Image (cartoon, rainbow, N blue to C red):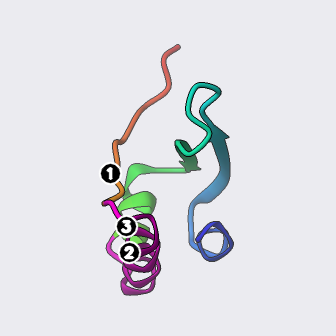
């Protein structure tokens, strides 16, 4: 998924984090120039198809939250 995201307008970077307490638990943090750039990728049919496949493999739905930097 991150390889496809890298080609999208406004993409900055992705970090994948693994829980120390539960090695089956991951968090993916992607950074975008603007929230609108992220929203455009979020509604992209290619992203949805990839995400549906991932969710099918892991047996649960992925959830998303938008965060903003704190200065």
Residue that label 3 marks: 42
Q: Is mark 1 in CB contact (under 8 Å) with mark 2?
A: no
Indicate the quadrant where residue 8 lies: bottom right
Residue in the foreground of this view, choosing between 60 and 15: 60
Residue 17 position, x and y percent, is 64, 40
Q: Is residue 71 above or below residue 54?
A: above
- Is residue 50 shown in magenta? yes
* Circle 2 Cα neighbour tier, 10 Å, few/some/many (<14 / 14–19 / ≥20): few
Q: Is residue 71 above or below residue 28?
A: above
Q: Is mark 3 in CB contact (under 8 Å) with mark 1?
A: no
* Circle 3 Cα neighbour tier, 10 Å, few/some/many (<14 / 14–19 / ≥20): some
Q: Is residue 57 above or below residue 15?
A: below
Dot 3: element: helix
Quadrant of the rendering where the N terminus is positioned: bottom right
Residue in the foreground of this view, choosing between 23 and 45: 23
* Circle 1 Cα neighbour tier, 10 Å, few/some/many (<14 / 14–19 / ≥20): few
Q: With 62 as the anchor, is 34 left or right in this view?
A: right
Residue 10 position, x and y percent, is 57, 61
Residue 63 numbered mark, or none: 1
Residue 41 numbered mark, or none: none
What span is colored magenta in the figure? Answer: 43-60
């Amino acid at each position: 998924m991150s390889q496809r995201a890298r080609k999208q307008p406004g993409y900055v970077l992705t970090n994948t984090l693994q829980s120390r307490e539960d090695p089956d638990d991951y968090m993916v943090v992607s950074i975008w120039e603007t929230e609108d750039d992220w929203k455009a990728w979020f509604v992209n049919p290619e992203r949805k198809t990839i995400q549906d496949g991932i969710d099918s493999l892991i047996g649960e739905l992925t959830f998303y939250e938008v965060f903003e930097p704190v200065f």
